[in-house]
Amino acid sequence: MTDAPDVSPNLSLPFYQTKQNEFEVQHNEALMMLDALAMLSVIDRDLAEPPASPAQGDRYLVGEGATGGFAGQDNRIAQYDIGGWNFHAPKVGWTCYVQDERTLLAWDGSAWQPALDGLGGASELQNMALLGIGTEADAVNPLAAKLNNVLWTARTAAEGGDGTLRYKLSKESADKTLSLLFQDNYSGRAEIGLTGDDDFHFKVSSDGTNWLEAIRIDRVTGKVVFPAPGGPREMLAANRTYYVRTDGSDSNDGLDNTSGRAFATLQKAWDRVAQLDLGIYTATIQIGDGTYTAGLDMTAVPVGTSPVVLRGNAGTPSNVLINVSGDGFVAHGPAQVIVKDMKMTCAGTCIYAIHPGAKMQFGNINFGVSGDHVRADGGSISATSNYTVSGGAQRHWLVNGLGSIGASFITVTFTGTPAFSGATFQFLGGGQMVLFSVALSGAATGPRYVGAANAVLNSFGAGTASTYFPGNSNGTLSSGAQQI
């Protein structure tokens, strides 16, 4: 059996021995050492000589190059007692809190180092719930830093790295957002990243609430899109459909038939299409079932050779109702557009071509009570498929100012005997109407036609039958107008 040691193995606390006299001396010495070393916290770590007026129990880490009462005690723990200073050598792994610096140190065997470095913790810090640097982290921002400068630098090849620094950010799925948000006093002003899909977006805001998308890079083609008005046009590489729904939002992108993606208004959808270069491809605005009370001004137009399609419900056109207090679809610019599969009731004109370069087509429309159903004051309009007239107006067709309206090989069905106060067909100011092999089914009230000022209504002889044009009074011609 080995002899009992004189001191404890870690703190070197003195033991008292069997039958030893004055064992309380060793006991008290051990307590003083515990008082000095347990829960170690020192006032300062830089003193090279003892302070002038220490209090009992004061503890210090002796500084380098110590002199006087601290001479030869560099880096040791000094505790002041009634009898003077007691010194204790640290062991590897001991930690010490320095009060004047508010920092935690650890002894690495040769020097006091910041505790995490001294313990190797900087490379082993794992699964922290919160980390705040210069500020407090919270549940919303579990990693928070309040700084003026941040430096990230690549580990060089000489340091065991490869000289490259790459940030890796990942989101859960395509419909989530992964972005950098730039704020002014915590209000968003710019955002870049994968916002709601996997295309790369650049957005800006003046108030943190309303956002404009300035640039989008398509994830499949790599093509750069400039959605903001006034920017370069996006050139289509395939047909594209934009969706409009009564439960949509004009802050959406319109590219999916859901409330979270569809536009709310026809005007927003048209304005988006007007920014495109269609080339040989077709842009379609698909209008969801419901009632729309705002018309569409087609002043701005896309570039390209294909018409834009405004499409409702082909099976039940009346499910999509354009019910406006003014004009419906108006081409103030050289729009090329096809309107189909909906019902229109407009206090003004439903389909209206004003610009001389406008080319509008329509079909499968149910025209309800309106100011005028179809009017061309310079542009051209063509009916390309069967349609219905269920409500009256001043005129069903009206041409003026060298405008033209035409149809061929279709059936127009008048239901409910709609009334036309001006005429079913009115042609003025050198305008032209053409009906070739068009069946006009049903009855109406009002003048069958009215022509004036060298305008022409050409039905290729069908109009010689007094009942061909719907109405209950004969047509009239004046000032060089002709009906042939």
Image (cartoon, rainbow, N blue to C red):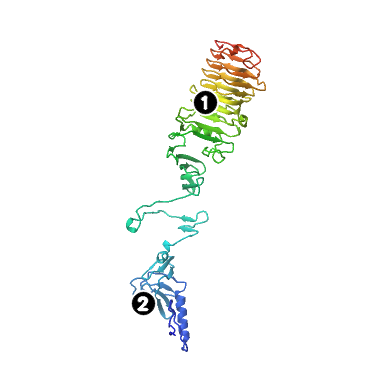
Q: Nearer the viewer, residue 185 or 333?
A: 333
When the figure is inspected, residue 24 is found, relative to residue 339, above or below; the finding is below
| Residue visible at 55% across and 20% down in the picture | 407
User: Is residue 55 or residue 16 the one in the foreground?
Assistant: 16
Horizontal relation, residue 481 to residue 302: left or right: right
Question: Real-space Cα distance between discs 2 and 1?
Answer: 98 Å
**Outermost residue to the left:** 158
x and y percent of residue 109 in the render? Answer: 37, 71
Q: Quadrant of residue 111?
A: bottom left
Q: Residue at x 60, y 15 (%)?
A: 449
Residues marked 2 and 1 touching at CB (< 8 Å): no
Bin the neighbour count of mark 2 within 10 Å (Cα to Cα): few under 14, some 14-19, many 20 and up.
few
On residue 203, the disc is none
Query: In the visual, does 267 lie left or right of 90?
Result: right
| Type of amino acid at the residue the image marks with label 1 | Ala
Would residue 260 be found to the left or right of residue 36 on screen? right
- Return the residue nearer the eye: 159 or 91: 159
| Residue 310 sits above or below residue 154 on the image | above
Classify the position of the C terminus by image quarter.
Answer: top right
Q: Local crowd at mark 1 within 10 Å, few (<14), some, or many (≥20)?
A: many
Q: At numbered mark 2, what does the secondary structure look like: helix, strand or loop?
A: helix
* Horizontal and vertical percent position of residue 447: 63, 15
The N terminus appears in which quarter of the rendering?
A: bottom left
Q: Which residue is mark 1?
A: 331
Q: Position of residue 82 (x, y in %)?
A: 44, 80
Residue at (32%, 57%) from the top-left corner? 158
Mark 1 residue element: strand
Residue type at mark 2: give it.
Gly
Where is mark 2, residue-wise? 69
